[in-house]
């Protein structure tokens, strides 16, 4: 049987996904999918996808709520600086970056929440706001990848804006992979129940 291929540190970059493997028991990340925003010698930064909170965007950032995809709530982006808001948007098209946006990868952009939301209306497919983020110091993610805690796979704008959450998103991302990694998407949440 071929070995399970989960990727290496060389596969990690803006726009890639870190998918928690079943052996990862940290409650902050067990069963999660993390969208990587930045990866360099200083470490890695990303946001956990598919973890909606109860906090309505309209209550905190009223100008941005009409551009947000459903549900219109903050998503828990990770355990770091949970009082910080990060916003990701999908903006199709080539050319210069629209004002107020900074490209992460492909059609996914970081949004400057101090910018005028009306200037972006009509140009975005949608956006999602995250409270907090996930971060790894230099060498930390390399160690976790070597231990098999994460699989690194390509991400898409649809992952960022997906209405799937928790285990459904995890299964969907793994299900589109190849080989033994895809088989994990069918495994029970509790391996002892197998």
Image (cartoon, grey):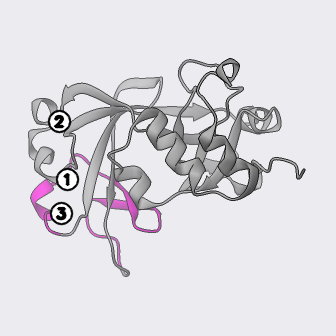
What crowding class fits label 2: few (fewer than 14 Cα within 10 Å), some (14-19), or many (20 or more)? many
Residue at disc 2, secondary structure: helix
Determine if the magenta segment contains residue 99. Answer: yes
Q: From the image, tell me which residue sits under label 1.
A: 115
91 in relation to 172, above or below: below
Task: State the CA–CA distance, disc 3 to disc 1.
Answer: 9 Å
Q: Earlier in the sequence, mark 2 or mark 1?
A: 2
Indicate the position of residue 69 as horizontal and vertical percent values.
Answer: 22, 49
| Callout 2–callout 3 Cβ contact below 8 Å | no
Q: Which residue is found at the position 53% from the left and 34% from the top? A: 32
Q: Earlier in the sequence, mark 3 or mark 1?
A: 1
Percent position (x, y) of residue 152? 67, 49
Q: Please provide the residue range marked out in magenta.
A: 96-122
Which numbered mark, 2 or 3, is in the foreground of this view?
Answer: 2
Left/right placement of residue 93 relative to residue 116 reads right
Q: Which residue is mark 2?
A: 57
Among the 4 quarters of the image, the one containing residue 178: bottom right
Label 3 close to label 1 by CB (< 8 Å):
yes
Mark carried by residue 193: none
x then y, percent, for residue 89: 31, 56
Q: Secondary structure at mark 3?
A: loop
- Viewer-nearest residue: 136 or 72: 72
Whether residue 98 sits left or right of residue 31 in the image: it is: left
For the residue carrying disc 1, how many other residues have a C-alpha within 10 Å: few (<14), some (14-19), or many (20+)? few
Cα–Cα gap, marks 2 and 1 = 16 Å
**181 vs 122: above or below:** above
The residue shown at (14%, 55%) is 116
Q: Which residue is mark 3?
A: 120
Q: Is residue 35 magenta?
A: no
Residue at 63% in and 54% down:
153
The outermost residue toward the bottom is: 95
Q: Quadrant of the C terminus?
A: top right
């Amino acid at each position: 049987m071929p070995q399970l291929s989960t990727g290496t540190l060389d596969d990690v970059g803006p726009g890639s996904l870190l998918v928690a493997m079943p052996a990862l028991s940290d409650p902050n990340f067990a069963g999660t999918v993390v969208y990587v925003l930045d990866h360099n010698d200083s470490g890695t930064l990303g946001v956990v996808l598919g973890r909606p909170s109860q906090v309505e965007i309209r209550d905190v950032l009223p100008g941005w709520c009409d551009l947000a995809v459903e549900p219109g709530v903050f998503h828990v982006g990770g355990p770091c600086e949970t009082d910080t808001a990060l916003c990701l948007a999908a903006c199709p098209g080539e050319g210069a970056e629209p004002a107020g946006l900074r490209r992460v990868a492909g059609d996914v952009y970081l949004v400057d929440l101090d910018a005028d939301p009306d200037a972006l209306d009509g140009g975005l497919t949608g956006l999602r706001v995250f409270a907090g983020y996930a971060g790894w110091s230099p060498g930390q993610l390399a160690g976790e990848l070597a231990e098999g805690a994460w699989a690194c796979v390509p991400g898409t704008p649809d992952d960022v804006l997906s209405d799937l959450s928790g285990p459904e998103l995890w299964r969907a991302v793994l299900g589109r992979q190849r080989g033994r990694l895809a088989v994990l998407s069918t495994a029970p949440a509790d391996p002892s129940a197998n």
